[in-house]
Image (cartoon, grey):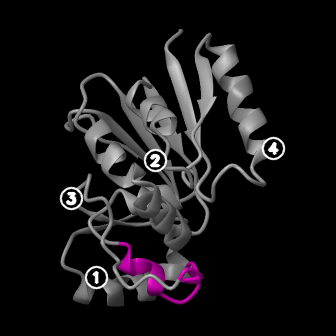
Amino acid sequence: PGGSFVYMPSGGISGAEEYISQWKDIANEYGATFSVVDNTSASHQEKDKLLNADVSLISGGNTFQLLSNLRESGLDSVIVKLSHKQDVALAGFSADALGLTPTIAICNLPGFDENLVEINDFSGLDIVDFELFPHYQKQSHGAVLNKYRETANNQVREITDEEYISLSSYTCTPVLYG
């Protein structure tokens, strides 16, 4: 109980009020202080919120938009720095879980995110050493995933909506959700 919990909606804070309220209630339930990070802002205040958090949760959404926001705000380097801290947890849902990998190239597969921001650099934050296929359903995605694996430069791990990956062998504890 206690500590500090930071929530970062993938598309910025506009339109995320429902989720902000839900995560605030969970933080309060555990006696944690709660704050929201706006990934569209390059302010020192937003960066400090992340660096001082015990638990940072970055939600899903459009992976291309998230990565673009992180790069433009400079929060991409802050998250990488956070990942090297001791005794912190960094959790990512869907889009963010993908963003923590070496590349988000998998998002170009049919049925994934639309590249609304037209980024050409698919490099992820490279915090974990594998790629991720979130929302995996064997019947729907098995053939597509197998074909992608033939050209991928990294191990690709699939994860369903009911699963998560906790990586305690890292300095911080990344927790990746489908």
Within-10-Å neighbours for mark 2: few <14, some 14–19, many 20+: some
Amino acid at pointer 2? Tyr
**Residues tagged 3 and 2 counted as in contact (Cβ below 8 A):** no
Q: Does the magenta stretch include residue 105?
A: yes
Give the image location of residue 76, x and y in percent: 37, 54
Marks counted in the figure total: 4
Q: Mark 3 points at which residue?
A: 129
Tell me the SS state at disc 2.
Answer: strand
Q: Is residue 20 left or right of residue 123?
A: right
Give the distance between the C-alpha atoms of the residues marked 3 and 2, in whole angstroms. Answer: 16 Å
Q: Do the residues labelled 4 and 3 touch (CB within 8 Å)?
A: no
- Say whether marks 2 and 1 touch (CB < 8 Å): no
Please give left or right for residue 50 compared with residue 137 in the image.
left
- Mark 4 / mark 3, whichever is N-terminal: 4
Read off the residue under disc 2: 164
Judge by depth and name the residue closer to the eye, 164 or 66. Answer: 66
Q: Residue at x 31, y 59 (%)?
A: 125
CA gap, disc 3 and disc 1: 15 Å
Q: Which amino acid does label 4 sit on?
A: Glu
Q: Residue 18 carries which label?
A: 4
Q: Distance between the residues labelled 2 and 4?
A: 23 Å
Image: magenta residue range: 104-117
- Dot 4 or dot 1: first in sequence order is 4
Quick check: marks 4 and 1 in contact, CB under 8 Å?
Answer: no
User: Which of the two residues, 114 or 11, is positioned nearer the viewer here?
Assistant: 11
Residue kind at label 1, given as amino acid type: Arg
Q: Which of marks 4 and 1 is in front?
A: 4
Is residue 159 something one can see in this rendering?
no
Give me the C-alpha separation between circle 4 and circle 1.
Answer: 36 Å
Q: Sequence order check: which comes first, mark 3 or mark 2?
A: 3
